[in-house]
Amino acid sequence: MDHEHARVFHLDRESFDESVLKMPKHQLASRAKGRDSHHRGESHDQKEYFESIAKAIGDAQEILLMGPGTAKLQFLKHAHKHEPKLEARVVGVESADHPTDGQILAHARKYFRAKDHMLGTNAGL
């Protein structure tokens, strides 16, 4: 996840499904011109972007947020304020500098296996 797009992966032991969500073009143009409003709260476009991400991951049992920069933390702040049930399912937030799809999948599978092992459950990947 970054300020331009979010790649959403739903995965289980054998398969995965990916979708890509993009920040509305108006917000991208504003950011490119230096009018980034992240210090003043969410813009309408950013809120719309985060709402689309929340909808895409709404039925996930556990959520790992990954990406460079601050977008993942801003999304978590959005979830705290607007989607508390979703926020409660976020089990990790990790920095990653634009990983490939394969790197994301490998990291997520390893992360959830380690979490399940630590908790003594076998529900993970």
Image: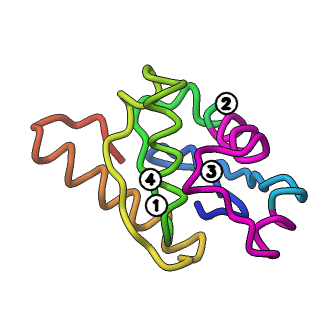
Q: Which residue is mark 1?
A: 66
| Residue at (71% x, 47% y) in the render | 46
Q: Is residue 47 magenta?
A: yes
Distance (Cα) linking label 4 and label 2: 17 Å
Mark 2 or 3 closer to N-term? 3
Q: Nearer the viewer, residue 66 or 119?
A: 66
> In the drawing, what numbered circle is on residue 73?
4
| Residue at (55% x, 56% y) in the render | 39
> In the drawing, what numbered circle is on residue 8?
3
How many residues crowd around disc 2 within 10 Å: few (fewer than 14), some, or many (20 or more)?
few
Marks 1,2: beta carbons within 8 A = no
Tell me: 100 left or right of 124.
right
How many residues crowd around disc 1 within 10 Å: few (fewer than 14), some, or many (20 or more)?
many
| Three-letter residue code for mark 3 | Val
For discs 4 and 1, the disc positioned in front in the rendered view: 4
Element marked by disc 3: strand
